[in-house]
Image: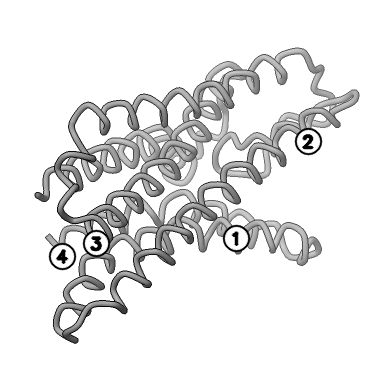
C-alpha cells in the first residue's frame, strides 16, 4: 500500500539531487576558491537544469497530493488507481512539461548581445539575472518568465489545495477521533514538503517586488535559501516520518 508514495519519494529525491548537483559545486567554488567565472553555455545549461527540475519538483508534489487524496478519499480503489503504469506516466508528464516549458529559454538568451557587464548578481545562473545583462528588447523574455512561473505555481498550488479540501471533508466525516488523527498523520510530511518548497518561492517573489531597495545580499541569500532549503529539509521530513 505504501509503494506509490515510495516511488514518488524516489522521484523527489532524484530531482533534489540534480537540483543540488547543478548549482552547489559552482557555489562552493565561488566561496572557497574565488572561482567567479562560468562559461556562457555552461551558464545556460545550469539555468536549464535549475528551472526544469524546479518545475518537475512542483509536479511531483502535486502528484503526491493526488496520492494522499486517493489514499484517504478512495482507499478501496487505491491500488487499482495508482498503478505503476499511472505513476510512470505521471513521471514522464512531469518531465515533459518541464522540458517543454524551459527548452526555449537558452535559445531566447543566445540571440542577445550582452553589454551591461559580465557579472550576474547571483551565485548561480538564474533566468532573470541573465536577462538583466542583455541589450535590446527583452520584454518577451520577461513576460515568458513571469507567465511560466505563474502558470506553474498557481496551477499546481490550486490543485494541491483542492486535494486537501476533499481530504479535509473526508477526514471530518470519520467517526472516531483516532481515525482522524491517523488520516491527518499521513499528510503531515507532504504538507511539510509543500511548505518547504513554496514558502521560499513566495517570500523571494514578494521581496523582489516589495523590497526592491533592499541590499543585494538579501535577495541573493533568499535565492540561495529557495534553491537549497527544500533538498536539505525533504530527507529530514520524510526520513523521520518513514
Q: Nearer the viewer, mark 2 or mark 3?
A: 3
Secondary structure under the numbered disc 3 in the rendered image:
helix
Gap between marks 2 and 3, in whole Å? Answer: 41 Å
Q: Nearer the viewer, mark 1 or mark 3?
A: 3
Q: With 160 as the anchor, is 39 left or right in this view?
A: right
- Local crowd size for mark 3, using a 10 Å CA cut-off: few (<14), some (14–19), many (≥20): some
User: Could you tell me which residue is drawn at 82 percent across and 28 percent down?
Assistant: 140
User: Could you tell me which residue is drawn at 55 percent across and 21 percent down?
Assistant: 100
Gap between marks 1 and 4, in whole Å? Answer: 26 Å
Q: With 239 as the anchor, is 131 left or right in this view?
A: right
Secondary structure under the numbered disc 2 in the rendered image:
helix
> What residue would you read off at disc 1?
202
> What residue would you read off at disc 3?
72
State if disc 4 and disc 3 touch (CB < 8 Å). no
Secondary structure under the numbered disc 1 in the rendered image:
helix
Q: With 130 as the anchor, is 177 left or right in this view?
A: left
- Local crowd size for mark 4, using a 10 Å CA cut-off: few (<14), some (14–19), many (≥20): few
Q: Residue 210, how many percent across, how many down?
A: 77, 66
State if disc 3 and disc 1 touch (CB < 8 Å). no
Amino acid at each position: 500500500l505504501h509503494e506509490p508514495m515510495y516511488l514518488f519519494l524516489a522521484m523527489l529525491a532524484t530531482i533534489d539531487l540534480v537540483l543540488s548537483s547543478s548549482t552547489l559545486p559552482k557555489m562552493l567554488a565561488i566561496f572557497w576558491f574565488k572561482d567567479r567565472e562560468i562559461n556562457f553555455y555552461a551558464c545556460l545549461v545550469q539555468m536549464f537544469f535549475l528551472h526544469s527540475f524546479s518545475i518537475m519538483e512542483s509536479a511531483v508534489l502535486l502528484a503526491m497530493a493526488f496520492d494522499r487524496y486517493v489514499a484517504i478519499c478512495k482507499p478501496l480503489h487505491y491500488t487499482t488507481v495508482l498503478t505503476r503504469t499511472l505513476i510512470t506516466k505521471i513521471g514522464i508528464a512531469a518531465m515533459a512539461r518541464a522540458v517543454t516549458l524551459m527548452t526555449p529559454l537558452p535559445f531566447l538568451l543566445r540571440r542577445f548581445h550582452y553589454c551591461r557587464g559580465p557579472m550576474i548578481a547571483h551565485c548561480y545562473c538564474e533566468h532573470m539575472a541573465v536577462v538583466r545583462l542583455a541589450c535590446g528588447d527583452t520584454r518577451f523574455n520577461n513576460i515568458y518568465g513571469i507567465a511560466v512561473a505563474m502558470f506553474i505555481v498557481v496551477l499546481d498550488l490550486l490543485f494541491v489545495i483542492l486535494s486537501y479540501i476533499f481530504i479535509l471533508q473526508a477526514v471530518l466525516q470519520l467517526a472516531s477521533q483516532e481515525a482522524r488523527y491517523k488520516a491527518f498523520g499521513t499528510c503531515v510530511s507532504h504538507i511539510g514538503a509543500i511548505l518547504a518548497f513554496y514558502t521560499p518561492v513566495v517570500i523571494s517573489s514578494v521581496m523582489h517586488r516589495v523590497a526592491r531597495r533592499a541590499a543585494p545580499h538579501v535577495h541573493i541569500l533568499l535565492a540561495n535559501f529557495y534553491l537549497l532549503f527544500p533538498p536539505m529539509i525533504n530527507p529530514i521530513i520524510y526520513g523521520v516520518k518513514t
